[in-house]
Amino acid sequence: MDGVAEVAGERFVLKQDYLFAGPQQAVDLMNGGHVRDPRKLWRDANGTSLHDLQTNE
């Protein structure tokens, strides 16, 4: 995957389209390691994780 992604400020971005074998591979790459529950990474404008939003409804 050399040359496909780069660090831009505080973000890790793909410079071109890239097909992953599955969503977990994409999350692991963008996070820099394995993530057990990706919903804990995604947050709204208030900083509340998607996991918390879904479990506290």
Image (cartoon, rainbow, N blue to C red):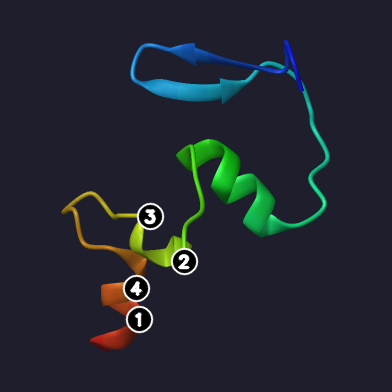
Mark positioned earlier in the residue sequence (4 or 3): 3
Amino acid bearing label 4: His
Mark positioned earlier in the residue sequence (2 or 1): 2
Q: Is the residue marked by circle 2 packed among few (<14), some (14-19), or many (20+) residues within 10 Å? A: few
Q: Is the residue marked by circle 3 packed among few (<14), some (14-19), or many (20+) residues within 10 Å? A: few
Q: Quadrant of the C terminus?
A: bottom left
Q: Give the residue pinned by disc 4.
A: 51
Mark positioned earlier in the residue sequence (4 or 2): 2
Q: Nearer the viewer, mark 2 or mark 1?
A: 2
Callouts 2 and 1 close, C-beta under 8 Å: no
Q: Which mark is residue 36?
A: 2
Amino acid bearing label 3: Trp
Q: Give the residue pinned by disc 1.
A: 54
Label 4: state its secondary structure: helix
Q: Quadrant of the N terminus?
A: top right
17 above or below 50?
above
Instruction: Pinpoint residue 19: horizontal percent, then vertical percent.
Output: 83, 40
Callouts 4 and 3 close, C-beta under 8 Å: no
Label 1: state its secondary structure: helix
Q: Nearer the viewer, mark 4 or mark 2?
A: 2
